[in-house]
Image (spheres, coloured by chain):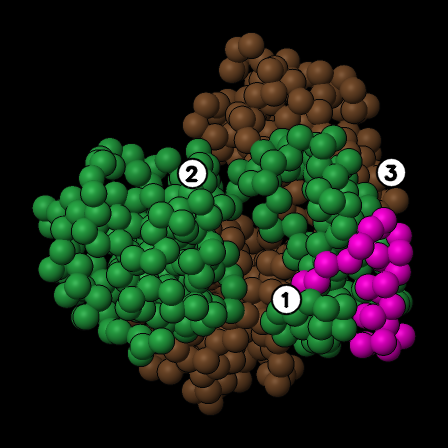
Chain colours: A brown, B green
């Protein structure tokens, strides 16, 4: 595993090649797609042949990222992954590309260095921030389309500048992108406001399921396969449910149990200053970060809830 | 009604006086409080005597804005209102102060010019942006406490930089405030994430009440006094409910009916590109903006819903 390279070196590599394939991660989000399409547009502006690939279908709401963009077929000379922490996250593209990825541009501290060279800034809120710097080093002025791709990556990975990964530099970079004509109203509305009816229905049922324990310090929300089926929700409707129990005033530990196909439960734990989510989940064979962690418990739901509440009780007392 | 004054003139007025009372609007929000306490802290840094007043109790979540700040009693020489569009919005403070308010610093285009002099920028997302400029003109460097007050005003009035009033200048000003040491993680969490249990319960009931009309182009959500009582929600828990129906994919017109004490309904209409909210509400004796408007209808709920859906049908067809 070699040392990460600099923005200047990454730009030099890209300047020296043609026929570039850009890989995004499976279950694509705003940062991998925004990074990928921004880089592709910039390389095409330099007269290069380039396209973006993704293992999964790109949700309709991201259509503006590739509007008017040609995605030609060609035999690649150079393969570059963006916002991909591990080659496993390439999904079905892994087998075709995993062993000859020349460059990875990423912001995950957990990056497995699967590419020949790695441009990594774990302190950046989004891979799109690094792509912005690479594009600048390539001498490409972002037009409105490139700026909208970059803005999308930054806005989605910061929860619209709400998460703690938002720094003064993040806001200044976003400001520069607005100067390029970004329609932030449209993007913010598309990314943060619009929910499918199925998602709203699932949220309603999930709120119905919420129960409080340990003097209301622990809130547990349950999402069963029956609820998912009744609501008509798909995989894209499931994002952002796990934080809900912890957002309730006075709750120290928020737990979301989501039933998996096999009847077991994926448990997501969210905490504030008062408890260590990773410590709770490690006691049940899982792991994660201080404030966001997970584990898996066998079904059915009731004993699974008892088990996790019991571990939370031992951790926070009460 | 005189011409609005400049930032420099407003700063000159404040520099020339002492014993300054700063007035905020009733049902105080992050912008009026953030503006008021930022200005108060800056004036005290200049050695002046100053305090902030509000007709209503300040919700607990804003406590960090005035932490460590002395709010002395004195006979005012100069009265300045911040983020107050109309003297009526001073609530119970109106009778004491309305006729001798020397200066108003505001960003509402609808400001009634009730003060002797008015510093107005209707293109600014928050009054706190103007207060930031006034503080700079006074020669005060924002410390962390002042910066957190200003950040709070800007973040809350832009929905954490999500609304269309967010410009490159807004983001740059927020970036500068982060440079002053603002704990944006704490502020964003306090302002945007935490909900009371009563609010979550009211939201659950409101989602239960959601009905769709006109080929699902129109969504109607009902909030009755019975639901409010069951949930235990107070006035502070009612913010931000009106946009919910319009956030559902495919909905052109989102309607929220909230029962008032007298049994009539306050109707909030939200629209996108496809319909004019103000036009809909004008047909029912109300008014407002292109995308957000309101009116009042007599109860009970069922005929009120029929009436508004009928007007929406005539407006959008279907």
Give a yes or no on whether discs 1 and 2 share a subunit: yes
Q: Give residue B303's position: percent from left, percent from top.
A: 89, 56
Taking the image as drawn, is residue B90 in sight?
A: yes
- Chain hosting mark 2: B
Residue for badge 1? B292
Q: Residue at x 38, y 65 (%)?
A: B114
Instruction: Name the spot of residue B298 as percent of width and height, x first.
Output: 80, 54
Judge depth for marks 1 and 2 and give the one in front.
2
Apparent side of residue B11 relative to residue B290 in the rendered image (left or right): left
Q: Residue at x 30, y 58 (%)?
A: B101
- Callout 1 and callout 3 share a chain: no
- Disc 3 with disc 2 on a shared chain: no
Quadrant containing the C terminus of chain A is top right
Task: Report the residue marked by disc 2.
Answer: B58
- Observer-nearest residue: B199 or B77? B77
User: Please, which chain is the residue tagged with disc 1 on?
Assistant: B
- Mark 1 Cα within 10 Å, few/some/many (few <14, many 20+)? some
Front position in the image: B231 or A268: B231
Question: Residue B233 falls in which quadrant of the image?
Answer: top right
CB atoms of marks 1 and 3 within 8 Å: no
Q: CA distance from mark 1 to mark 3?
A: 37 Å
Q: Secondary structure at mark 2?
A: loop
Q: Residue furthest bottom?
A: A47
Magenta span contains residue B295: yes
Image position, residue B80 (x, y; %) = 28, 56
A216 left or right of B92 in image: right
Q: Residues within 10 Å of mark 2 (few under 14, many from 20)?
A: some
- Label drawn at residue A226: 3
């Amino acid at each position: 595993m070699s040392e990460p390279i600099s923005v200047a070196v990454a730009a030099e590599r890209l300047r020296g090649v043609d026929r570039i394939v850009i890989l995004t991660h499976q279950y694509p989000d705003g940062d991998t797609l925004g990074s990928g399409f921004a880089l592709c547009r910039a390389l095409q502006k330099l007269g290069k042949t380039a396209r973006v690939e993704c293992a999964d279908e790109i949700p309709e709401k991201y259509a503006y990222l590739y509007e008017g963009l040609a995605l030609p077929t060609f035999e690649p000379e150079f393969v570059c992954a963006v916002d991909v922490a591990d080659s496993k996250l390439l999904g079905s593209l892994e087998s075709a590309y995993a062993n000859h990825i020349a460059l990875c541009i990423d912001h995950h501290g957990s990056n497995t260095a699967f590419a020949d060279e790695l441009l990594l800034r774990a302190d950046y809120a989004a891979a799109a921030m690094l792509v912005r710097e690479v594009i600048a080093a390539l001498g490409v002025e972002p037009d409105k389309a490139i700026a909208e791709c970059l803005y999308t990556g930054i806005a989605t990975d910061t929860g619209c500048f709400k998460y703690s990964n938002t720094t003064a530099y993040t806001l200044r970079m976003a400001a520069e992108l607005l100067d390029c004509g970004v329609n932030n109203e449209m993007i913010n509305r598309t990314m943060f406001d619009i929910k499918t009816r199925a998602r709203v229905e699932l949220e309603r049922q999930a709120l119905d399921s919420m129960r409080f324990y340990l003097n209301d310090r622990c809130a547990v929300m349950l999402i069963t396969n029956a609820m998912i089926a009744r609501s008509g929700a798909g995989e894209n409707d499931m994002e952002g449910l796990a934080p809900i129990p912890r957002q309730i005033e006075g709750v120290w530990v928020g737990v979301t149990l989501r039933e998996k196909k096999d009847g077991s439960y994926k448990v997501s734990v969210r905490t504030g200053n008062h408890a260590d989510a990773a410590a709770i989940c490690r006691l049940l064979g899982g792991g994660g970060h201080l404030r966001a962690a997970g584990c898996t418990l066998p079904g059915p739901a009731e004993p699974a809830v008892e088990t996790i509440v019991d571990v939370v009780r031992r951790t926070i007392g009460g």
